[in-house]
Image: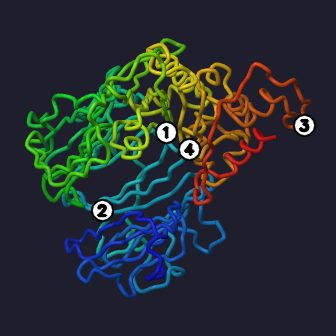
Amino acid sequence: PPTTGTAKTWVWHGSTLLDDGNFDRCMISLSPGGSDADTTREFCLKTNSFLEGGFEMLEPAKSRIDYRSRDECLVGTDFGKDGSCMTDSGYPRVIRSWRRGTPLEEATTVFEGEQSDISVSQYAYRDHGVAHEFRVRSLTFYTSKYWHRTPKDLEGLTAADDDTPFVEVPIPADANVGTFADAALVSLRSDWTVGGQTFKQGSMFSLPFSDLMKGDVSAAQILFEPTDSKSLESSTTTKNYLVLKVLEDVRSTLVVWKWADGTWTAHGGGGGGDAVGVGEDVAVQSLNRFSDADDRVYLWRDGYLRVDALDVADASDLSKSETIKTKPGFFDAAGLVVEQHFAISADGTKVPYFVQRRADAPADGSTPTLLDAYGGFEISMTPHYSAGVGIGWLERGGCKVIANVRGGGEYGPKWHQAALKEKRFKAYEDVEAVAADVIKRGIAKPEKLAVIGGSNGGLMVGNMLVRPVASKLFGAAVCQVPLLDMKRYSHLLAGASWMAEYGDPDTDEWKFLRNHSPYQILRHDRLGLAEDGGAATAPDDSWTCPKVLFTTSTRDDRVHPGHARKMVKALMD
């Protein structure tokens, strides 16, 4: 990229460090304007400059590049710039071995997926001195096929020259597999019965990788098993420990396991037996780029009213941590409170939500209130500090509500799958239930209550605008970079990758997709306009659209701005 006069145009997309013990080279990825497409250049950490003659990909694309050794990278990109090496979703379909000092055009193809895959990857690494190499075809957003081999010599043989065969990892398509030394870490999105044992949906277990490859789970150790209120949010490894972040009713707890002599032991020094306070959160990250270097970790602590703080601790005793950095407070939290409540959805499901407000706010419904929700892709809406919300809303007397509706990951895979595809309406019923509960508690009247959401949350807001019940619960809405036309979403930008979440509109699944496609509901069901060659109908005179602000971006290469533009056009007409 140009090196002068362009600082404002480039967005940091991360770095990849060369894992050969020298810690002197890395790949730096920068995105022009913040799109998913990015450029990559090799950087020398000794001279603090981009490496002359190093690996570089200067054409912005949705690429993937990883070191395999000092002089070899595994790369997937739009080779030929004709789209043939990309999937329908716009991600790499072909992986090539690229040797240092050779043109990218001469890289050797080592792995190919199908056009219908979401993406394809191949990567190699050392974990506690054990070499692993994987090939992965991401079939849908939630299913993958893994192949594994133990490479002969990462430094001496390229991926193309190593004739060690890859063997498919025998796990369910919706499971994930990682490693710790020569052990496998398996996490499940559905129940798995194998070898006479049943491992529960949402659980994590470990066993020797060689046993897993043989289908022998007799030595498996269960490291986490969910309950109705507990789910596994994430995991972090160090040299000797595994730290699990567990959510219980959307409150974080840290659970620690110690590795010794090829087995795991529950470790009492986790310092995480008690959950964090209501409206607060803690996240764990290995302090080292390569987690097997030692047992130090970062603890990122924040909350709706708690300023971000970065602590350092040893995984052997997380209760003893040292704060090394704290952001300044951007708003006055004095007099503000955070509460957690539960609403009862239409089918009786308890739905948690957080309320941020002034402690002395009257319970007469007069407080301007923003209700935010996402409800998709197994993403949890955990508490975090937001200067924008604090300055722009809470300090001015507003109330912010965060609804942890189905479709998210707050209670694990089951919570997510409860609102997949034809069950999508469950997420919208949950939002309606939270809104009704907010009104019932006297926090806000409908005319003082607004709904806000972006991307998948924008789809939620679109449905709130056109659903008969929801449109009467809200006086206003903010619909940010939304999906709205679910008939055509899969043909726009990255939309094809989301069909496992929503459904395929080009099949019979359109029958249920139509029921939560705001654009079609607005035009035909509410405004009475003809749909797909059919006859016009009488407008729905009982429907009134809340006041709504739409935002979108031409820089967004996931959600097409046409969704918002078409919806606005229909409303204005």
Q: Secondary structure at mark 1?
A: loop
Which tag, 4 or 1, sits closer to the chain's start? 1
Tell me the CA gap for discs 4 and 3. 29 Å
Residue mark closest to the camera, 2 vs 4: 4
Tell me the CA gap for discs 1 and 2. 28 Å
Q: Are marks 4 and 3 in contact (CB under 8 Å)?
A: no
Work out whether 261 lies above or below 510.
Answer: below
Location of residue 349 in the rendering, given as x and y in whole percent from the top left corner: 46, 16
Q: Which residue is mark 1?
A: 377
Q: Are marks 2 and 3 in contact (CB under 8 Å)?
A: no
Q: Which residue is mark 4?
A: 455
Tell me the CA gap for discs 2 and 4. 34 Å
Residue mark closest to the camera, 2 vs 3: 3
Location of residue 52 in the rendering, given as x and y in whole percent from the top left corner: 37, 87
Label 3 Cα neighbours within 10 Å, binned few <14 / some 14-19 / many ≥20: few
Which tag, 2 or 4, sits closer to the chain's start? 2
Residue type, numbered disc 1:
Phe
- Using the image, tell me which numbered label, if any, was put on residue 385: none
Q: Which residue is mark 2?
A: 125
Tell me the CA gap for discs 2 and 3. 56 Å
Locate residue 12 relative to residue 504 in the image: left or right.
Answer: left
- Using the image, tell me which numbered label, if any, was put on residue 533: 3
